[in-house]
């Protein structure tokens, strides 16, 4: 099981990706924009195994 962060501004894409990866057994955190994603990365104890990010995001690009 991996700890993943999904950074995606489109709610439907973010939700679909999170559900699919959770069903595969992964722990998922989500962020709706680049700034929120960066804050989660900085606060994550032990970091993330993988960050899946959209390229164009509000606040800051991925």
Image (cartoon, grey):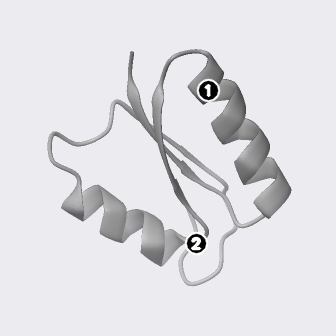
Of 55 and 5, which appears nearest the observer? 5
Question: Where is residue 5 drawn, in percent x and y?
Answer: 47, 45
Give the quadrant of the C terminus.
Answer: bottom right
Residue at position x 30%, y 57% in the image: 41
Does 21 appear above or below 30? above
Question: Where is residue 28 drawn, in percent x and y?
Answer: 48, 39
Question: Where is residue 18 drawn, in percent x and y?
Answer: 64, 39
Question: What residue is disc 1 on?
Answer: 21
Question: Where is residue 43 drawn, in percent x and y?
Answer: 21, 62
**Outermost residue toward the right in this view:** 12
Does 29 appear above or below 32? above
N-terminal label among 2 and 1: 1
Of 20 and 37, which appears nearest the observer? 20
* Number of other residues with Cα within 10 Å of mark 2, as a class: few under 14, some 14 to 19, many 20 or more: many
Q: Are marks 2 and 1 in contact (CB under 8 Å)?
A: no
Secondary element at image label 1: helix
Answer with the quarter of the image where residue 31 lies: bottom right
Question: What residue is disc 2 on?
Answer: 33
The alpha-carbon separation of the residues under discs 2 and 1 comes to 19 Å
Residue at position x 15%, y 47% in the image: 45
């Amino acid at each position: 099981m991996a700890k993943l962060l999904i950074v995606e501004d489109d709610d439907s894409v973010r939700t679909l990706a999170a559900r699919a990866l959770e069903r595969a057994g992964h722990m998922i955190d989500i962020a709706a924009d680049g700034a929120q994603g960066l804050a989660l990365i900085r606060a994550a104890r032990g970091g993330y195994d993988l960050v899946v990010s959209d390229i164009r995001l509000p606040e800051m690009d991925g």
